[in-house]
Image (spheres, helix red, strand yellow):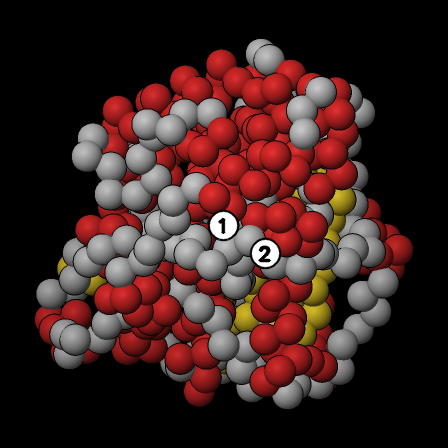
Amino acid sequence: MHRLRLVRLAVPLMVFVAVATVALPVRAGNGTRVHEGDIGGAPYRVEVPSRWNGTLLLWSHGAYGLELPPPSEIALMNHPATRQWLLDQGYALAASQYRVVQGWGVVESGLRDQIALLDWFGANVGEPRRTVSAGASAGGLIALLLAERHPGRFAGVASLCGVLGGTTGHLNSALDANHAIKTLLAPDLELVRAKDPDANAAKARQVLTTALDDPRGRARLALAGALADVPGRYASRAPAPASVADQVRQQYFYAYYDRGGLWGADRADIETRAGGNPSWNTGVDHRALLARSSRKDLVKRAYREAGLKLGEDLERLNAAPRVQADPRAVAYLDRYGTPRGRTPWPVVTLHSTDDGTVPVENQRWYAERVRRAGDPAKLRQLYVDRGYHCTFTASEEIVALRTLLGRMDTGRWGDTRPASLNKAADAFGPDRQTVFDLSPEPGMHPTTPAFTHHRPGAYLRP
């Protein structure tokens, strides 16, 4: 599975309503009313249980990469079993597929299309008593931005595996890793403004694959990964392997699959939307960057095994030509992708400890923003001990949502110690104890709840 998990309200709302196409609601076998239609070119799906409790969960999906077709069905939750639990408990669900489904343009589109859907729901289904903004990956970022920009319309936020360091930091971090690949392994690769994005991405992947077979190449892959805090753990359930070679291979999978489009189509798309290149590494000290990285120990081991001098390669990185950003493009990403940390409502985040697509350090950066904004008591950050991206069981998602809903109901947080969370998650049946894993083959596999204590390292490129 290839994932790339990541508004200008220039058109009056009345235009969205005027161009909406609505199918008559149908009733599912359990009495749930299903509404499907189109608002301004954005398909949507709404499900309302027969005994709706008055709370709506507005779900924001992530960013699908441009190298594969997007899903044909509209997701209403990260895990399908979580969706069913919510309906069974009386919660209504709504999600727009957005007009822009792929690439980083989903943030701008999602901010507009989700509010249009929320307006439609109030006018055609009923005004919710309260609304939860929830989403995963880039949708986890959208969920937060929606609530920050429309605080009166939401009562709480659940951000799963969210890009909470913002799209500017995410793309800068990818540039740091790619700068190391270009400088140390393939000087003719283009970091930004690629003349032929597809060819550039194909060449980058070839370079990555070739480097994997040589100890010196592996050391430099480890360094590139560490500059973006990419862990050496790609499978969701298995722990990180012990050997340097195997950990670097796991980093390679992130670089090849999940981040490979940032050499080509995905970066070209955001440059087009932003009106230029939004990323920069001017002024970056790569030696200092590595010193702050959560993955620096793997780099040191890899360089020792390869017989290379790490200091010499860091000097090469610092001496190499730098990339300057276009101010207009930076301003675009700032409008469509940087949380401010202002929380007049409770927020729950959930993240895997070894996520290499959206590294867990994003969570610490967001927590610091909330703390500076003055109300850290309204934030609870939960972690599960897993690799890969958005790898949660339905039981873990339900427990996270119950944590948020309990805070919304009572004004107090319940017990969020990992042992208590795992006990609560373990009470669910086996159909809610599965997680997506690529090993031994891509699909949903059985596992056990894995809430854990975790303190992420510093976010390298805010």
Question: Who's the residue at 48% across and 71% down the image?
Answer: 339
Q: Secondary structure at mark 1?
A: helix
Left or right, residue 74 beside residue 113: right
Using a 10 Å C-alpha cutoff, classify the residue at mark 1 as few (fewer than 14 neighbours), some (14 to 19) or many (20 or more). many
Query: Which residue is identified by label 1?
Result: 173
Task: Say if 324 sits above or below 156 in the image.
Answer: above
Q: Secondary structure at mark 2?
A: loop
Tell me the amino acid under the disc marked 2: Leu
Closer to the camera in the image, 224 or 92 = 224
Tell me the amino acid under the disc marked 1: Ser
Query: Which residue is identified by label 2?
Result: 460
Mark 2 or 1 closer to N-term?
1
Residue 68 is at least partly visible in this image: no
Question: Who's the residue at 16% across and 62% down the image?
Answer: 40
* Residue 399 rendering spot, x and y as whole percentages: 71, 58
Q: Which mark is residue 226?
A: none
Image marks 2 and 1: residues in contact by CB distance under 8 Å: yes
Task: Say if 262 sits above or below 440 in the image.
Answer: below
* Residue 302 rendering spot, x and y as whole percentages: 71, 26
Question: Who's the residue at 57% across and 29% down the image?
Answer: 221
Residue 183 is at least partly visible in this image: yes
Res 454 → quadrant: bottom right
Closer to the camera in the image, 109 or 35 = 109
* Residue 219 rendering spot, x and y as whole percentages: 63, 26
Using a 10 Å C-alpha cutoff, classify the residue at mark 2 as few (fewer than 14 neighbours), some (14 to 19) or many (20 or more). many
Res 111 → quadrant: bottom left
Question: Who's the residue at 68% across and 54% down the image?
Answer: 292
* Residue 366 rendering spot, x and y as whole percentages: 59, 68
Left or right, residue 329 beside residue 457: left
Left or right, residue 94 beside residue 425: left
